[in-house]
Structures are given as structure tokens and as C-alpha cells.
């Protein structure tokens, strides 16, 4: 029994200050049983506008993602990087995402498909299901009326053509053009564009003009014609590889008629190109600039540019600069750039890490 005085004291204290909380002994239990005490929690997600990617781990709800809706709100840019070892589902994610995006009428996708088997790229079946013929760049097929992309296509601006020629040469040479070589290329390109009007100018015209520059080009800078010819020799040798070397047939003629840049899905099949050769970054440079000047337009369409085996780009500083320009179209023209690599080290350890 408690002391009567203590009971009276507690009653008086409770009257003045309220009931005093009873001291309880601690409860010992397992985490498996204690989890019922806490309310369930899950990530809030990214809204309900866009395409479903999968299911959230904790809530089981559909995970919705749309870079164009989220840009400027939850996301600082609409571009993304896909990382994962072979067999971890990168291809399944990319293909599912693209097919679901194409359900929207204002979406358009370009894929650089650098992998394949059985003689075709891995996007070939999807293209067939959509009734689309991939643009297959193949040096052997190009000699037999295959696909050609002309770096001097009139649909590309004069400035864009010159930038593309410089990028091709810098990728092949592994260093930037010096001022003298750049001058020789510039005057050769200007002369070809001014004098050839009855047909599309082609790379053969540039090579020929570099080998035999016009006297006017030398007189304009008060230099000897032999100097201009010497300055352009290395440039001519690099371009000659696209005309009469191992890359001939793909870029040394007018652009193939019938390439549909208004199709919802455009697949560049690069699976026949040796991914470890200099041909791959040259191809990506040409395709990138060609798309920059012929595909990306201010027409309110939302575009997705997906690059398989993107480490080929990252390992070439000059091509990386080209694709860095494309990243800036995200704000102005609604472009989402998707790069697919195996390891994060492919990005941070590459020659173009800066």
C-alpha cells in the first residue's frame, strides 16, 4: 500500500498541473514486428504524364517518366544516360521506352544502332514492325547502290557543310586543323559551292579543288599557289579516304533519294562498321551534323536522339563537341539526348571527359 500522504500529494499535484504521466518500462521487440507501428512510405514519383517505365519498388505503382514534361520543373535537362552491363536490360528499356513514346503523335526518334547480329542491327525488327526501312550504312553495300549521305547536301547550310568537313578531318587526323589547312579547306569549299550549280556538289569536287587550287584563292591572301596546295594536301588525303578508301561509297555521292526524315522512327544501322576503327566516330560525326541541319527543326515536335555504344563518341573529343552542341537543343527545340554505355568509367575516363 502507498503512503496516504503520497496519495494526497499526488492528487493535489494532479489538480494543479494535470495528471502526471505514468512511467512505463521499455518494450523489446524485433524489427519484423515493429515495422507495423510505422506508416508505409514510398517515393512520390514524377507525376502521371508520360510513358510508364515500370513499377516502383515500394508502392507498386506505375513509374511514369516524360523528359519533356519534367524539363524545367523536377529535371534540369531532358537528357539521360543509360548505364548497365550486358544482360541487365538496357536494350529492353530503350526499346520499350521508344515504342511507348511513339504512341504520342508529336514524338520522333532517331537511333544510332551500332550493334547487331545476322547481318542487321538490333533495331531492325522494331523498324520492320513500324513499316520503316533502316538507313543501313555499309561500305560494301554502298558500292552497289547502297545508302549515301552527302556532307555537301544542299539541305545543309554552307556553314554547316564547312563545319562537317572540318569535323570529319579532325576526327580522322586526331587533332584540330591548323589555320593554314583550314584556309585551304575553306577556299576549296567556297569555290565548289559557287561553281557547281547543275548538280549536288560531292566530296570528289572538294578533293580535286584541294589538289588543284585556283590562283584567285592564293591572290586573295597574297600567298603563293604552291603554298595553298601544300596546306591542303593532308586535308585532301583524309577526304580521299571517304572517296576512294575503306569508307568509299557512303559519303561520296548525292544523298540517296527516299530517306524519310519525317518518319516517326529513323534508324541508322551502323552494325556493319567496325566499332573499333576510326570509321565509327567519322560516321557518327557525319550523321550528327547531317541530322543537326536536316532533322532538328522548330516545328513543335519532341525529338529523342538515342545513341547506342556511346563510348565511341566519348572517346573522340571532336565528335563529343558535336554532340555537346546537340545537347543545347533540349531547351530551344525540344530534343532529348539518350546515351547508352556499359560503365560510368566509359564517360569519366574517356579522352573527351572534359
Image (cartoon, helix red, strand yellow):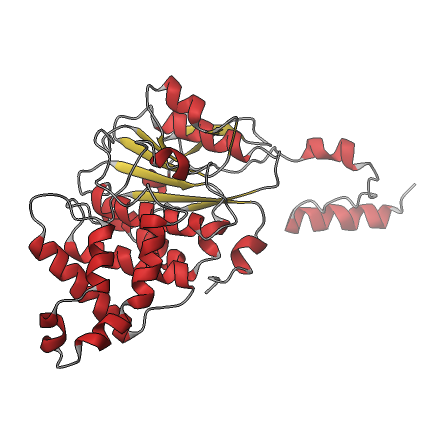
Q: Nearer the viewer, residue 27 or 70?
A: 70
Q: Residue at x 75, y 35 (%)?
A: 34
Q: Position of residue 18 (x, y in %)?
A: 65, 46
Q: Residue at x 28, y 50 (%)?
A: 289
In the orientation shown, which residue stands out farthest toward the bottom? Answer: 222
Look at the image and tell me in which quarter the N terminus lies: top right
Residue 192 can be seen, yes or no: yes
- Residue 98 found in image quarter: top left
Q: Nearer the viewer, residue 119 or 122?
A: 119
In the rendered view, does 335 fall on the left or right side of 87? left
- Residue 99 found in image quarter: top left
In the rendered view, does 141 fall on the left or right side of 264? right
Q: Nearer the viewer, residue 315 or 48?
A: 315
Q: Position of residue 239 (x, y in %)?
A: 31, 56
In the orientation shown, which residue stands out farthest toward the right? Answer: 1
- Residue 53, placed above or below residue 346: above
Q: Position of residue 229 (x, y in %)?
A: 23, 71
In the rendered view, does 87 fall on the left or right side of 262? right
Look at the image and tell me in which quarter the C terminus lies: bottom left
Q: Position of residue 3 (x, y in %)?
A: 89, 47
Q: Nearer the viewer, residue 156 or 227?
A: 227
- Residue 102 found in image quarter: top left
- Residue 115, placed above or below residue 330: above
Q: Residue at x 32, y 41 (%)?
A: 249
Residue 72 can be seen, yes or no: no
How many labels, in total? Answer: 0
Amino acid at each position: 500500500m502507498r503512503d496516504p500522504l503520497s496519495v494526497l500529494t499526488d492528487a493535489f499535484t494532479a489538480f494543479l498541473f494535470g495528471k502526471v504521466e505514468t512511467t512505463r518500462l521499455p518494450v523489446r521487440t524485433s524489427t519484423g514486428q515493429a515495422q507495423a507501428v510505422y506508416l508505409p512510405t514510398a517515393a512520390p514519383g514524377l507525376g502521371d504524364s508520360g510513358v510508364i517505365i515500370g513499377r516502383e519498388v515500394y508502392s507498386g505503382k506505375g513509374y511514369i517518366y516524360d523528359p519533356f514534361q519534367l524539363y524545367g520543373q523536377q529535371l534540369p535537362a531532358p537528357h539521360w544516360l543509360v548505364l548497365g552491363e550486358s544482360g541487365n536490360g538496357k536494350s529492353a528499356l530503350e526499346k520499350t521506352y521508344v515504342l511507348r513514346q511513339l504512341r504520342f503523335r508529336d514524338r520522333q526518334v532517331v537511333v544510332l544502332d551500332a550493334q547487331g547480329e545476322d547481318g542487321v542491327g538490333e533495331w531492325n525488327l522494331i523498324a520492320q514492325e513500324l513499316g520503316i526501312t533502316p538507313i543501313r550504312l555499309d561500305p560494301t553495300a554502298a558500292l552497289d547502290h547502297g545508302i549515301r549521305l552527302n556532307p555537301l547536301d544542299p539541305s545543309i547550310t554552307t556553314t554547316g557543310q564547312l563545319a562537317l568537313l572540318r569535323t570529319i578531318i579532325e576526327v580522322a587526323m586526331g587533332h584540330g586543323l591548323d589555320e593554314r589547312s583550314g584556309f585551304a579547306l575553306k577556299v576549296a569549299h567556297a569555290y565548289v559551292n559557287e561553281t557547281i550549280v547543275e548538280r549536288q556538289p560531292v566530296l570528289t569536287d572538294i578533293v580535286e579543288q584541294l589538289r588543284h587550287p585556283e590562283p584567285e584563292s592564293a591572290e586573295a591572301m597574297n600567298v603563293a599557289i604552291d603554298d595553298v596546295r601544300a596546306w591542303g594536301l593532308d586535308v585532301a588525303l583524309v577526304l580521299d579516304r571517304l572517296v576512294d578508301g575503306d569508307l568509299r561509297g557512303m559519303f561520296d555521292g548525292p544523298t540517296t533519294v527516299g530517306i524519310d526524315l519525317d518518319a516517326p522512327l529513323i534508324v541508322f544501322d551502323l552494325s556493319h562498321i567496325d566499332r573499333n576503327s576510326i570509321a565509327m566516330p567519322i560516321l557518327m560525326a557525319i550523321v550528327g551534323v547531317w541530322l543537326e541541319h536536316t532533322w532538328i527543326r522548330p516545328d513543335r515536335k519532341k525529338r529523342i536522339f538515342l545513341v547506342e555504344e556511346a563510348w565511341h563518341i566519348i572517346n573522340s573529343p571532336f565528335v563529343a563537341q558535336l554532340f555537346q552542341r546537340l545537347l543545347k537543343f533540349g531547351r530551344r527545340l525540344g530534343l532529348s539526348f539518350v546515351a547508352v554505355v556499359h560503365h560510368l568509367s566509359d564517360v569519366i575516363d574517356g579522352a573527351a571527359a572534359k
